[in-house]
Image: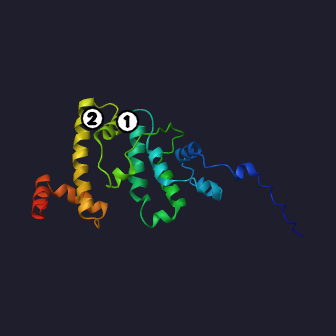
């Protein structure tokens, strides 16, 4: 006759433990696809995919590994994580982050300051100072003059995208990206003249 197993008492300290960012990054480095599944419901609330993508893609150091993480997280995970269907499945998002890892062991992930969400969403123009700080962290080996030039080009292009987002609020961000490549500042000036501005 089969006996009923006694329920294993749950350690309440573990149940109430918060989501641990650094443990999660180590799990991504190891390609631990089941790590998310083993979290409690409370811990899962701490999984913020945008933040995880930002941390997972930034490895301290030089050479191929940091470059690999940056490109792989962007290509394998970031490209699809915010798809309207994928967003409904955080465990799938977790697996996509694990798939982006080369699986070569624990790495030192660093925080790289990023542009404000309002800037990314084209709701606020980028500031040269912020862009320079961002590029300096990402491209640590590039000369300050090149950083200045890159930053100015970004700010100029971003200004055009903000204008398009404001003028045509129904356009998707991907359409704004494409349109900003096709039109010039002169086109915008003429359009504004025709509108009487």
Residue at the disc numbered 2: 147
Q: Residue 80 appears in which quarter of the rendering?
A: bottom left
Mark drawn on residue 32: none
Where disc 2 sits, the SS reads helix
* Residue appearing at x 69%, y 51% in the figure: 16
Give the percent coordinates (x, y) of residue 32.
57, 50
Q: How crowded is mark 2: few (under 14 residues within 10 Å), some or many (20 or more)?
A: many
Between the C-alphas of marks 1 and 2, the distance is: 10 Å
Task: Return the residue nearer the eye: 196 or 59.
Answer: 196
Give the percent coordinates (x, y) of residue 64.
39, 37
Give the percent coordinates (x, y) of residue 97.
48, 52
Q: How crowded is mark 1: few (under 14 residues within 10 Å), some or many (20 or more)?
A: few
Task: Return the residue nearer the eye: 23 or 103.
Answer: 23
As drawn, is 11 to the left or to the right of 140?
right
Query: In the displayed image of the protein, which residue is found farthest to the bottom?
Result: 1
Residue at the disc numbered 1: 137
User: Can you say which quadrant of the picture contains the C terminus?
Assistant: bottom left
Give the percent coordinates (x, y) of residue 93.
50, 58
* Rendered image coloring scheme: rainbow
As drawn, is 176 to the left or to the right of 110?
left
As drawn, is 43 to the left or to the right of 54?
right
Question: Total of numbered circles in the picture?
Answer: 2
Where disc 1 sits, the SS reads helix
* Residue appearing at x 52%, y 44% in the figure: 29
């Amino acid at each position: 006759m089969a006996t009923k197993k006694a329920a294993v008492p749950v350690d309440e300290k573990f149940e109430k433990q918060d989501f641990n960012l650094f443990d999660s990054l180590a799990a991504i480095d190891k390609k631990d696809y089941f790590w998310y599944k083993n979290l409690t419901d409370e811990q899962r609330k701490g999984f913020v995919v945008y933040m995880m993508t930002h941390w997972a893609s930034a490895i301290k150091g030089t050479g191929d590994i940091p470059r690999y993480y940056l490109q792989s997280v962007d290509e394998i995970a970031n490209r699809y994580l915010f798809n309207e269907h994928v967003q409904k499945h955080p465990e799938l998002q977790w697996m996509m982050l694990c798939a982006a890892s080369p699986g070569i062991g624990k790495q030192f992930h660093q925080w790289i300051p990023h542009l404000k969400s309002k800037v990314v969403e084209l709701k606020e123009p980028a500031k040269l100072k912020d862009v320079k700080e961002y590029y300096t962290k990402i491209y640590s080996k590039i000369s300050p003059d090149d950083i200045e030039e890159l930053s100015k080009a970004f700010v100029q292009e971003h200004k055009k995208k903000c204008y398009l987002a404001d003028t045509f609020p129904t356009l998707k961000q991907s359409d704004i990206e494409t349109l900003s490549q096709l039109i010039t500042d002169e086109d915008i000036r003429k359009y504004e003249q025709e509108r009487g501005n």
